[in-house]
Amino acid sequence: MSLAPEIQAFLQRLENLNLPQVWEAPIEVIRRNTQGRVVTSGPVEAIKEISHRFIPGPTADLPIRIYRPTSASSAPAIVYFHGGGWVLNFLDIYDASLARLANQSGATIISVNYQKAPEHPFPIPFDDCFATLQWVTAHAEELQIDPARIGVAGDSAGANLASGVAIKARDNKIPLAFQLLIYPCNDRNFETESYVKNATGYGLSTQAMQWFWDQYLQGSQHDTNPYAVPMRADSFSGVAPAIIITAQYDPLISDGEKYAALLERDGVTVLYKEYDGMIHGFFTNLAVTPTAQEAIDSVAVEIKKLTQ
């Protein structure tokens, strides 16, 4: 399938803005340029409660946002890690998509604003995310969630973090109900089919991903650490069941395909779905494409099945 018409129009609008590439401007400039993503994420639908608080992290207090769709005293939960190449983005961008996901799945979502590279490289963002899972598990009663029905989720770099957290949860015998990985970047191999085929012209570029990885890992010393590069794990046996979402015109589609195959090889239940005509980032862009709502609602159905 060719690019969806609304995605073509969206890419043209981005091109007309003539914004610098991530490697072409200071960090504070590219971060400021993400402010417009709140508009493309769409309006936030009504939900029972959205609350904000800070929790203690390993090296700093961490802002979290809690999306509660129900008054149930023991709801399922999703610990969510947002995308942005470990460098960009903030919680406001995700209000619309996470409110809908919470409402449709019946799960309380806890989203964390982890510390960002390059000021805070690996393992700091990862440690923040794992600590958030630990905090949520320890405070399940206060959060009115069921500790036996907690999953992790994330998009892009957040899906990398969720993948790593799921592996460490397995290693530390912390049970997870599922892992939702939305166009994950789980390997540092830029010669895959999609990194070559979709290198430019579709929003996220292969060169941008190389730059993001460089900010996060800052050298090659972590390239074999599965918490940093999840594809490098010796075994995936025993990790949580996975829902993996990819987009047809995304440099990262090969990462999603390969990770799904590795999980299945080691006996992990995987639901994999590629969205035709879509680009990286579509899942949160409710104001851009109706496929975002379709994908969120589809994922919610699967989460319900895994948290019954």
Image (spheres, rainbow, N blue to C red):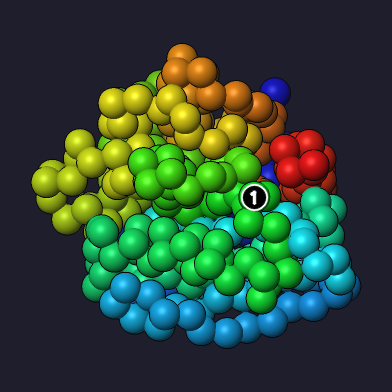
Quarter holding the N terminus?
top right
Report the residue at 67% width, 70% height from top. 141
- Residue 289 percent coordinates (x, y): 76, 49
Which residue lies at the image location 28% right of the left edge and 26% below the top edge? 234
Q: Secondary structure at mark 1?
A: strand
Q: Is residue 277 above or below residue 68?
A: above
Residue beneath disc 1? 148
x then y, percent, for residue 163 = 45, 43
- Left or right position of 177 against 263: right
Q: Viewed as shown, does residue 107 lie left or right of 147?
A: right
Is residue 269 visible in the rendered image? The answer is yes
What residue do we see at 80% from left, 42% from top?
Answer: 308
In the rendered image, residue 132, in percent from the top left (x then y), is placed at 47, 66
How would you rate the neighbour count of disc 1 (Cα within 10 Å): few for under 14, some for 14-19, many for 20 or more?
A: some
Image quadrant assignment for residue 40: bottom right
Disc 1 residue type (three-letter): Ala
